[in-house]
Amino acid sequence: MSGGGNADTVGSLLASIATCLTEALRILMFADKRQWGPDEFEQIRALEEALDEAKKDYQEMSPLVHGQFYYQNDRTSMSIHELRNLHAKFEFHAQNFKDWARQGGPINPTWARETAELKKDLHRAQCRAAGRIFAAEQEGARCLGAFQVYRQQKRLEAERQQRRHDHNEQPLWQQQQQQQQLTAEDGATQYRGERPDDPRRRSSLEELVPSCNAVGRFERLGDLDAAFVCDFCDGFIVWPDLRGMPAARTTNTTTTTTPPPQAPGTSNDSASSAYPHWQATGQSRSTGADKTVVFAPVAIANHVAPGLGAWQAGILCPYCDEYTYLDQGEDSEEDVRYAQDEKGFPDLAAFQAHLEWYHTALAVPAMPPLASALPASISGCRVM
Ligand SMILES: [Zn+2]
Ligand SMILES: [Zn+2]
């Protein structure tokens, strides 16, 4: 037992946890392997994986929060509390192997599962520890998990701009998109996105799917709902009554024949191509009918940690960041709605309602002249 007590830091507790793992591994390495079956080798593998992931996380978290020194010496009380509890569990787990070495006989096959569970707990504890440092520094901003997806999105967008510039490419949205569905029915599911082979399709939102999987997990919630749970803030994003998470956005047929978009506000292209493309088509789990949902990366890249006592992550509207709708007038109720507070929308349903009202083209009639003949309030004056 470490007597460190009050001197504990994130770094010292992670080191103690790593010691538990290396000790357990050493016991197995030096054991007499002549009687071993698959369970013993499986156990070694589980311990090695846990140790590798702990190191990898440690190395990856540090640069996200101003470097190793900062992360290592952090003493955020929640993080210390969590890691102390986790350390106790790892010590208890490691004791199994010491006892086993003394007594001999086959290894308990359930221990490998325990090791894998502890590995996951440790991963999330490290994510949360880094997330707390990040949150303390950047009040009101995205959670660290969202920030990583958002940063990747900006990186890809910059690359795409560069490529367009270099190669005078066909615009991304002219490419056909194939709808893929995540069909796993229960349990933790891996959300697989497209692997765009065409370089022109790269850096679309679909490309953020791996980043989303790296910062959290998709789960079923109750009988009907699908949820994303962020490893960094423990916040849930809930898609009500959804069978599978769409891995691509809905193909927007209205934009396939329109000219390339120009700078916002300077073009006379159709309203639909000037609006953000956030929609994906999923199926209702209760009725099987198609329904429009928010494409997962849009929500994940813009979520904020749940407030005190809440479990659902708030969601910031990325399009209100880009286009300001705020009227500098009386503080009417409408203004309050546009001015995003730092908590964002309280849940995905509220976010989707906002997107439908303010960031969605109305169905454009087949004859363009008719559209321009409509009163401005109907034909999409919100574009600007
Ligand atoms: Zn989060
Ligand atoms: Zn908005």
Image (spheres, helix red, strand yellow):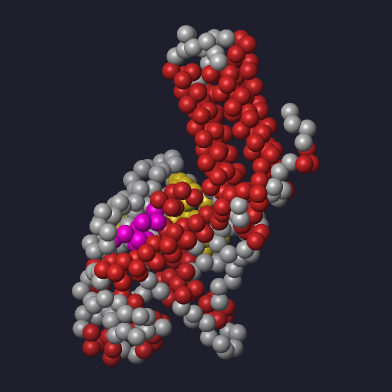
Residue at image position (69%, 39%) is: 12
Above/below status of 125 relative to 27 = below
The one nearer the camera, 307 or 155, is 155
* Residue 204 is covered by the magenta coloring: yes
Q: Residue furthest front?
A: 166
| Screen quadrant of the N terminus | top right
Residue at image position (46%, 48%) is: 214
Does residue 307 appear to the left or right of 47 in the view shown? right
Above/below status of 373 relative to 117 = below
* Residue 135 is covered by the magenta coloring: no
Residue at image position (49%, 18%) is: 40
Does residue 146 appear to the left or right of 155 in the view shown? right
Label tally: 0
Above/below status of 267 relative to 228 = below
Residue at image position (66%, 51%) is: 70
| Screen quadrant of the C terminus | bottom left
Does residue 143 appear to the left or right of 45 in the view shown? right
Residue 85, image x and y in percent? 68, 37
Residue 292, image x and y in percent? 35, 62
Residue 176, image x and y in percent? 23, 62
Magenta span = 201-209
Q: Looking at the image, can residue 181 be seen?
A: yes
The one nearer the camera, 203 or 328, is 203
Residue 130, image x and y in percent? 60, 51
Q: Looking at the image, can residue 362 be seen?
A: no
